[in-house]
Amino acid sequence: MLLKLYRLAWKLGSPFIGLYLWRRKRQGKEDIERFDERLGVPSLPRPASKLVWVHAASVGESVSVLPLIEEMLNGNAWIHIMVTTGTVTSAKLMQQRLPKRAFHQYVPIDKKEYVEEFIDYWQPDLAIWVESEFWPNMLFETKQYGCPLVLLNGRMSDDSFHRWSKRRKFAKLLLSCFDLILPQSRDDAAKLRELGGKNIKYFGNLKYGAKPLPFDENKFHEIKDMIGSRMVWLAASTHEGEEEEIVRTHMKIKEKNYTVLTIIVPRHPHRGHDIRDAIPPQIHTALRSDGEKIFDDTDIYIADTMGELGLFYRLAPIVFIGGSLVDHGGHNPIEPANVESAIICGPHMENFAEIVAEFEAAGAITRAYDAKDLAFKVFELWQNPQKRTAMSRLAMKYVRSKAEVLNNVIDEIEALL
């Protein structure tokens, strides 16, 4: 009954959905050249071998599953892997990072007819959902086709849990589609179990199995030469409303060290020009997407490009995790830990609460609560290289100690193949 109501809502809402998609096209949020994929129409031939389908909502989820994809392909020469995502940014990143025998398609809009065409064409042998995106038609059609389903690194925020708790029957129906649920934290395991999930096995967060982000060594030396011996720190994956705080932090540090360089890598690179336009003109900025260089008087370097976060983690020994000074839930601290960074986060790290708690217990991260506090923490770590090195090594050591998560997860998934 609930599924019928959901499908009826899609049918009645089709005109409005069409308008919504038209607006997304106008805003550059849909890939016009490949838009038919969003309607369930494939753009590539199906491989003749067994096909594992991995669905990840966006950039963070798709990056987190790359190590698993690589290991599964290395250990199984008889499979191909298809990765679906819903955003243009993640599609570009996957095209750059996916190994051989893996390819990308856009996930179809969750209309029954589109989903049916998608499933009928690709006929997956195993489907893996990453984290928390539950599309009812996709799940039910995949299950009805007879494909085993895995919820990988399953996540359930407090807000999502509260919403699903009001629809427990529907939540239980959706979760019943999964043959195996691998949550990313003990708290997530408890929430998913309470909502009706079955066969839940907790090994730890899959992100602990990630390899260090790649970087271009030539670009590293080029930018390193431009920076010279200046004090430098990085604000990574920042969000709207957060860059203003980073600019205030920069000015407070500059009162103590005139030569400081702040690097901002926005979570959404297309915001680069907007970020610079909001910075007062007396603060000298350089925009990477425009090919601008770093000079001695450059205050803030806005690295608004795709796939270069690994480069900037290595250029800046001190990293602030964006999305955590604003109420966004933070981003993955394992990435900078993997390259031996000294890590600072803000008060809002709800999306990675368990990981941050483990990092704090290991002495591998510190929190800052506003621009003034962040400036103090950054400057303190710069002035105390011994403390900075000890903290960064503890972070790397802790991450490496949890690397067995990936192998345990792969063993469980491959058993379904």
Image (spheres, helix red, strand yellow):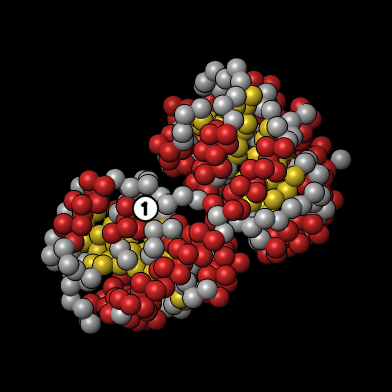
Circle 1: residue type: Leu
Q: Which residue is drawn at 43% across and 34% down?
A: 95
In the image, is 111 to the left or to the right of 91?
right
Judge by depth and name the residue closer to the eye, 89 or 125: 125
Instruction: Say whether residue 63 is visible.
Output: yes
**Residue 277 place in picture, x, y as percent:** 27, 59
Q: Which residue is drawn at 74% across and 53% down?
A: 201
- Which image quarter is the C terminus in? top right
**Residue 183 place in picture, x, y as percent:** 68, 54
Number of on-image labels: 1
For residue 319, above or below residue 100: below
Judge by depth and name the residue closer to the eye, 131 or 359: 359
Judge by depth and name the residue closer to the eye, 274 or 297: 297
| Secondary structure at numbered mark 1 | helix
Quadrant of residue 312 in the image?
Answer: bottom left
- Which image quarter is the N terminus in? top right
Residue annotated with mark 1: 309
Q: Residue at x 64, y 20 (%)?
A: 121
Q: Residue at x 40, y 36 (%)?
A: 96
In the image, is 327 to the left or to the right of 202?
left
Quadrant of residue 318 in the image?
Answer: bottom left
Instruction: Say whether residue 242 is visible.
Output: no
Judge by depth and name the residue closer to the eye, 375 or 385: 385
